[in-house]
Amino acid sequence: AQKITQTQPGMFVQEKEAVTLDCTYDTSDPSYGLFWYKQPSSGEMIFLIYQGSYDQQNATEGRYSLNFQKARKSANLVISASQLGDSAMYFCAMREVGGFKTIFGAGTRLFVKA
Amino acid sequence: GAGVSQSPSNKVTEKGKDVELRCDPISGHTALYWYRQRLGQGLEFLIYFQGNSAPDKSGLPSDRFSAERTGESVSTLTIQRTQQEDSAVYLCASSQVTGSHYGYTFGSGTRLTVV
């Protein structure tokens, strides 16, 4: 069965510094996609970044990058140059290629300090 | 529409009453999903619709929960005889295609409180 594990319930980072949010996953399917979503206090889920299991390079989207280590089954999100607006919940998620259901981790709450 | 629209944004209901939650997906998005998020927790899959195919209801927690979707448009999630443990935010999402790298577009959710 698929599983997503986020072991950091809360993280603090100083504004303008980089932060890494951890995510490990478990699946028996060789083809899958990994996602990160941001949920601000407003409650809406915002799609940030995607990594395919066969992608050779780590995905990047602006200040977001995904540190994908397939052998270790980890997909950590790196946020560079943190901003106060980055304070939010962050969810790691996974979906099998050809599948329809995305499963989510429990989330990490990020606090950016001025 | 420009985004996924959910209504109502907040709903307070008495235990035992039925509630109906509405989701209007982005036009052209064939896939629609309902998730439940209890306070401080992650997202729990409820149900998935893809075009005119039979929905996958494997995530519905009990037979008090049901959902309908008309073609590729509006979906309603109905909870009958609500219980206090049904209190949560119910999130709807849509996507262009399934099995791809497309992330979901989520609505702002309906916060349901059962008193």
Image: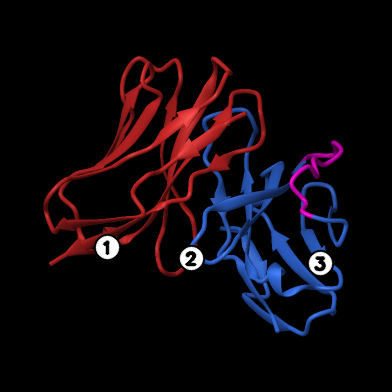
Chain colours: A red, B blue
Badge 2: residue crowd in 10 Å (few <14, some 14–19, many ≥20): some
Chain letter behind tag 1: A
Q: Position of residue A88 (x, y in %)?
A: 35, 60
**Residue placed under numbered mark 2 in the picture:** A43
In the rendered structure, which amino acid carries the disc numbered 2?
Gly
Query: Where B12 falls versus B19 (above or below)?
Result: below
Say yes or no: labels 2 and 3 on the same chain. no
Q: Name the mark on residue B79.
A: 3
Residue for point 43% across, 51% down: A107
Badge 1: residue crowd in 10 Å (few <14, some 14–19, many ≥20): few
Q: Name the mark on residue A85.
A: 1
Residue for point 77% across, 85% down: B14
Q: In which quarter of the image is the C terminus of chain B?
A: bottom right
Do tag 1 and tag 2 residues touch (Cβ < 8 Å)? no
Say yes or no: labels 1 and 3 on the same chain. no
Q: Can residue B78 be seen in this view?
A: yes
Comparing labels 2 and 3, the label whose residue is closer to the camera: 3
Q: Where is residue A75 in the image (x, y as percent from the top left)?
A: 37, 31
Query: Where B81 falls versus A65 (above or below)?
Result: below
Say yes or no: labels 1 and 2 on the same chain. yes
Asked if the stretch drawn in magenta spans residue A28, the answer is no
